[in-house]
Amino acid sequence: MAGRDYGALGATFKIVRVLQVVCLLGCIGMAANFISEMVTNNDVPSDELVGTLSVTCIAILYCAITYILHIDNILPYLINTGMDGMMLIALVVVAFVVGKPLSYLNCQVIGTSSVAESASQLSSELKNQFNQNGGKVVYSNWIGANKTTCYEMKAIWGLSIALCILFCFSALCSVCLWRRSKTIPPKDMA
């Protein structure tokens, strides 16, 4: 690999970026699957899922670009710190919006006999909400439709929380790498 070797700090930055990409790919896959299901049913996808997909797609491009720039030793670490902070803010919003209704939902009780008795009531409520919102899926009702959807949305929520931690950590690494890049003398090209 080209560029300076920043030791354990540089390796940590690379590992954190790889973990971010893995988490982002999981979020993108699950959110895109849900949006695909909604579109297949001729429904308008919820804003929460579209927003999640948008933020995660931008974040994965950002991670790939900064990883390459880091390897080539041309990453402006101070600017990268600010960008990591902005990604952190965007992912905190995603975690909040996705997780707010999920935090009150117990996925284990979905589909049990007491809940199954009111399945027709839930179905009619979903249809009423769907018609009132101009054909747009209501996120808070949709996540409780079945166990699989509930668990997958909780997985997206958990991954978005993990991404918040990882982006905070990569911002700290970027600050340290910036400080270190100022103290390491450049190699002589001759």
Image: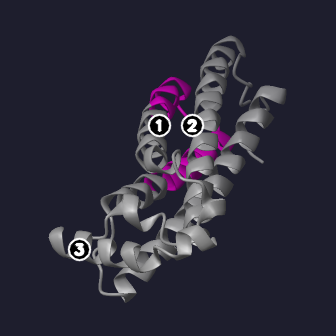
Horizontal side of 190 relative to 86 (left or right) equals right
Disc 2: which residue: 164
The correct choice, above or below, for 40 with respect to 49 in the image is below
Q: Which residue is mark 3?
A: 128
From the viewer's perspective, is residue 139 above or below residue 36?
A: above
- Left or right placement of residue 156 versus residue 14 in this view: left
Quarter of the C terminus within the rendering: top right
Residue ID for mark 1: 92
Mark on residue 55?
none
Q: Report which quarter residue 133 is drawn in.
A: bottom left
Say few, some or many: other residues with alpha carbon within 10 Å of mark 3 (under 14 / 14 to 19 / 20 or more).
few
* Predominant SS of the magenta segment: helix
Query: Is residue 130 or residue 1 the one in the foreground?
Result: 130
Q: Is residue 67 magenta?
A: yes
Which mark sits nearer the N-terminus, 1 or 3?
1
Amino acid type assigned to the residue bearing label 1 in the image: Val
Q: Horizontal placement of 43 versus 98: left or right?
A: left
> For the magenta stretch, what is the residue range?
58-85
The furthest residue to the top: 183
Q: Are marks 1 and 2 in contact (CB under 8 Å)?
A: yes
Q: Position of residue 53 (x, y in %)?
A: 43, 61
Q: Is residue 4 visible?
A: no
Residue under the point 79% across and 32% down = 5
Q: Quadrant of residue 45?
A: bottom left
Along the horizontal axis of the image, is 107 left or right of 129? Answer: right
Tell me residue 107's x, y (percent).
61, 60
